[in-house]
Image (cartoon, rainbow, N blue to C red):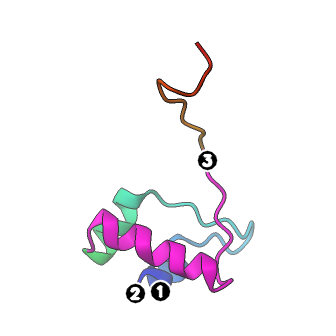
Amino acid sequence: MILRALVCHFLDTKSGRCDPSYKQIQKQTGFCVQTIAVALKRLERAGILDITRRIARKGRNSGTN
């Protein structure tokens, strides 16, 4: 259902981009964030998706003080 939501509701066929937020996927599917995260990881491992992170978060212990 996650893959179907991505392809049918979020895929931009002109650019090939598909970058909805977890919240948008949750609204479309009704699944919790944890279920969405697991499904996306499985789709990536299967070679169906290529996930690129949009932001890099820096934590307190990242060594860049």
Quarter of the figure with residue 2: bottom left
Q: Residue at x 52, y 80 (%)?
A: 42
Q: Which mark is residue 1?
A: 2
Q: CA distance from mark 2 to mark 1?
A: 5 Å
Q: Nearer the viewer, mark 1 or mark 3?
A: 3
The residue pinned by badge 3 equals 54
* Residue underneath mark 1: 4
Q: In the shown orientation, is residue 17 left or right of residue 38? A: right
Disc 2 is placed on an element classified as loop
Residue 32 lies in the magenta-colored region: yes
Q: From this view, report whether residue 25 is shown above or below residue 42.
A: above
Q: Left or right of 30: which side holds 35?
A: right
Q: Residues within 10 Å of mark 2 (few under 14, many from 20)?
A: few
Dot 2 and dot 1 residues touching (CB under 8 Å): yes
Amino acid type assigned to the residue bearing label 1 in the image? Arg
Tell me which residue sits at (45%, 56%) in the image: 21
Position in image of residue 58 (x %, y %): 54, 30
Mark 2–mark 3 distance (CA, rounded to whole Å):
23 Å
Query: How far apart, in angstroms, are the residues tagged by discs 1 and 3?
Result: 22 Å
Ranked by sequence position, the earlier of labels 2 and 3 is: 2
**Magenta region: which residues?**
31-54
Residue 32 screen position, x and y as percent = 26, 68
Assign the N terminus to one quadrant of the image: bottom left
Tell me the element at label 3. Answer: loop
Query: Element type at marker 1?
Result: helix
Residue 41 in magenta stretch: yes
